[in-house]
């Protein structure tokens, strides 16, 4: 079980690190991380992630409430996909 937990931890850390690098606000929302945690996580090397994953306990967070947390309008706006191309649509 310990090896499985290490593997899950490492996968979680790698995913959270990449998201923190690409879109810190999304990482804050998806992984329930603070701004400081995002900055620290995004700068870690793979070896440092492996060391953290070997801690012997789950490092990911599981929500304990059944009601979803509120998403503010600023977070929702930041997560909206905006197409990068200016395609014109023909109207029939």
Image (cartoon, rainbow, N blue to C red):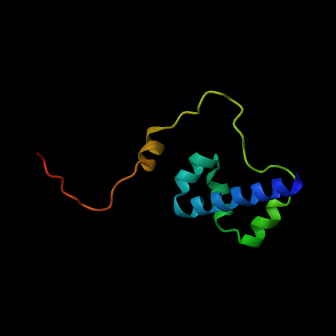
Above or below for 82 versus 67: below
Q: Position of residue 14 (x, y in %)?
A: 67, 62
The residue that appears at 60% across and 63% down in the rendered structure is 18
Q: Position of residue 5 (x, y in %)?
A: 82, 53
The residue that appears at 45% across and 42% down in the rendered structure is 76
The residue that appears at 39% across and 51% down in the rendered structure is 81
Give the total number of marks visible in the rendering.
Answer: 0
Give the camera-side residue of 8 and 84: 8
Q: Quadrant of the C terminus?
A: top left
55 sits left or right of 76 in the view: right
The residue that appears at 44% across and 49% down in the rendered structure is 78
Q: Residue furthest left?
A: 92
Give the camera-side residue of 27 and 6: 6
Q: Position of residue 46 (x, y in %)?
A: 72, 71
Q: Position of residue 4 (x, y in %)?
A: 82, 55
Above or below for 40 versus 34: below
Give the camera-side residue of 73 and 57: 57
Q: Residue furthest front?
A: 92
Give the camera-side residue of 2 and 46: 2
Above or below for 69 versus 12: above
């Amino acid at each position: 079980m310990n090896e499985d937990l290490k593997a899950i931890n490492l996968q979680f850390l790698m995913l959270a690190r990449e998201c923190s690098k690409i879109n810190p606000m999304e990482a804050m929302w998806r992984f329930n991380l603070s701004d400081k945690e995002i900055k620290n996580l995004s700068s870690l090397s793979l070896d440092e992630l492996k060391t953290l994953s070997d801690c012997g306990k789950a490092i990911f967070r599981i929500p304990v409430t059944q009601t979803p947390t509120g998403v503010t309008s600023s977070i929702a706006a930041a997560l909206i996909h905006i197409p990068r191309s200016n395609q014109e649509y023909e109207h029939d």
